[in-house]
Image (cartoon, grey):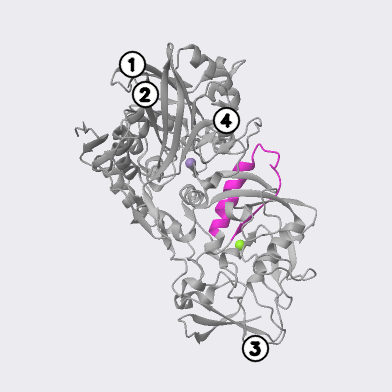
Amino acid sequence: MSLSLSRRGFLAGTAGLIALHPFSLRAAANQAHLRIMETTDLHVHVYPYDYYGDRPTDTVGLARTAALIEEIRAEATNALLIDNGDFLQGNPMGDYIAYERGMKEGDMHPVIAAMNTLGFDASTLGNHEFNYGLSFLEKSLAGATFPVVCANIAKSLGASPTEDDMLLPPYVILDHQVTDGAGESHPIRVGLIGFVPPQVMNWDRKHLEGNVQARDIVAAAKAWVPRMREEGCDLVVALSHSGIGGAEHEEGMENASVPLAGVEGIDAILTGHSHLVFPSSTYDGFPGLDTAAGTIMRKPGVMAGFWGSHMGLIDLMIERDGAGWRVVTHTSEARPIYTRGDDRSITATVDSVPAVLAAVAVEHDETLAYVRRAVGKTDAPLHSYFALVADDPSVQIVSNAQAWYIAQMMVGTEHEGLPILSAAAPFKAGGRGGPEYYTDVPVGPVAIKNVADLYLYPNTVRAVRVTGAQVKDWLERSAGMFNQIAPGAEDAVLLNASFPSYNFDVIDGVTYQIDLSQPSKYGVKGELENEGANRIVNLMYDGAPIDPGQEFIIATNNYRAGGGGSFPGASPETTVFEAPDTNRDVIVRYIVEKGTVSPRADGNWSFAPLEGTSVIFETGPAGAGYADSVPGVQIEEAGMSDTGFALFRITL
Ligand code: MN
Ligand code: MG
């Protein structure tokens, strides 16, 4: 495409009229406008496609983000394009390449092929680059036409960071030409240095232990940045695959972007990892940030969402200052690929770039076949029709996968050896979703796309450390799912319609019964209503009554551990582990590694008997075929509701 500059400061190109950025218009003879463009946390999203749901989506995909690049480049006299890490893993295309096709020497990874079409200037590593091991990473990076840097992962540590034997170059210095306000070209040296959370040593222990070591992000920056300055960098940009967290530096901190931005010699900072947007009101009031100015410790900063949702922009007005360049003013912006209406509807604002789609067209088709094909099998039906009245296989498999994963993550930590319990709730269990809104995966092959049905939300895994007393209260909170039932009642309504099923956590690893004759201890929002109530009875761990003082790890998700539903014991204070992985990815890995899963409900909970009492509940009509095989409960059909649900009777 050829561009011509008109008198009014507009570029006429194939995309129509493009307004030049004010810095490009305003730059004086000794000044230049340099734009830095960021993608981050792409997680192999190239096509605008949800492979779990097996349907197109307008909110993701580098092919869409790429549509912004042409326009964004055209708005600026000088531009750099940088990726901030987490490109190799995070959707079924990534799993397909790692688990099925493989990466042989000389193979091209599709996300790298897509990135190569766009002329990236550099990238850093994200934590997920280590998920499939170092050899896979090495072969993937070999295809990149751009340099990849990382300053805090070493093959072996030396006496100081600059003496480490690095896995990758810690930084790269780009010798570019910039065009100034008078149209003259000048050399500039831009240094790009990358960082990843040192927690990778724990998250990917099985791949990394004994092979590499990590340094604190800020410590590495303080050692390397002065060297970059000595080597004549005019500007140093930190590629921080780390979130925006506290302003106080703590050794080994995961979300270190604020103290990192404060390191002398860093001029601008690209952030990521948290899958959020900066500047945005999300970060209002955070120490060290100015969301209006788009600064982190007074340096320009940006975070470009995730999965290609945004293109991050830092615009620098730079000025020649003796021998070098310095930043005189700047702006930051995260530009989205779609808009969301007041009714939450999504409108795409860009079209996919054909060349980017073409780069991964073969792998896209292969991934579609992969998500539709069996990757394992189940020898029990995975349905949720009776998930609210009995232990249930669709909840059990989630629970099993979480416990399996957390057991690996606790190795080598101070929590190793504590008993691991797992909490999971049925997400698709009728209610407002209607009589068809249930999980229903039959016996036989399990495809990747089924996992979306088993785990509806893109939550991430977390672990909390709680006491036996908190385990009981957690379950008391869950038991608010049920109405209080008078002993001897006939056909009493069992389920509390205002209680959402996603707050009905079943905890695996303990056994218990629910006494429906008691009132609920907690209200629908988690408020304490009946302090002395005890619906949870016969709560046992390892065959003996639970010790209220004993400590446990509970595997759960970020919603619950973040305080969602106000569950006793589930809070940021009790959280001991925040996984970088989604529950969905963990379930896929669990199924792939096990081959055959047998998620038979283990019947670890049931209702306590209430003599001469019966209750009625509703479920999807398609559940009738499974009613005979529900463990630990006596169920019979009881007609239909006028809203299309099947009614069942339980004799307690
Ligand atoms: Mn990420
Ligand atoms: Mg169970």
Can you see residue 334?
A: yes
As rendered, which of 556 and 395 lies closer to the eye? 556
Earlier-in-chain disc, 2 versus 3: 2
Question: SS of the residue at dot 4?
Answer: loop
Whether residues under marks 3 and 4 lie with C-beta atoms below 8 angstroms apart, the answer is no
Question: SS of the residue at dot 1?
Answer: strand
Q: Can you tell which quarter of the image residue 221 is in?
A: top right
Residue position for label 4: 209
Earlier-in-chain disc, 1 versus 4: 1
Question: Going by the image, does 383 lie left or right of 110?
Answer: right
Please identify, in this view, whether the residue under mark 2 or under mark 1 is nearer the observer: 2
Disc 1, ligand 1: is the CB inside 8 Å? no
Please identify, in this view, whether the residue under mark 2 or under mark 4 is nearer the observer: 2
Rounded to the nearest whole Å, what is the CA distance between mark 2 and mark 1?
9 Å
Question: Going by the image, does 83 lie left or right of 549?
Answer: left
Question: SS of the residue at dot 3?
Answer: loop
Q: Amino acid at mark 2?
A: Ala
Residue 186 - label: 1
Whether residues under marks 2 and 4 lie with C-beta atoms below 8 angstroms apart, the answer is no
Whether residues under marks 2 and 1 lie with C-beta atoms below 8 angstroms apart, the answer is yes
Task: State the image coordinates of residue 536 (x, y, percent, origin top left).
Answer: 73, 68
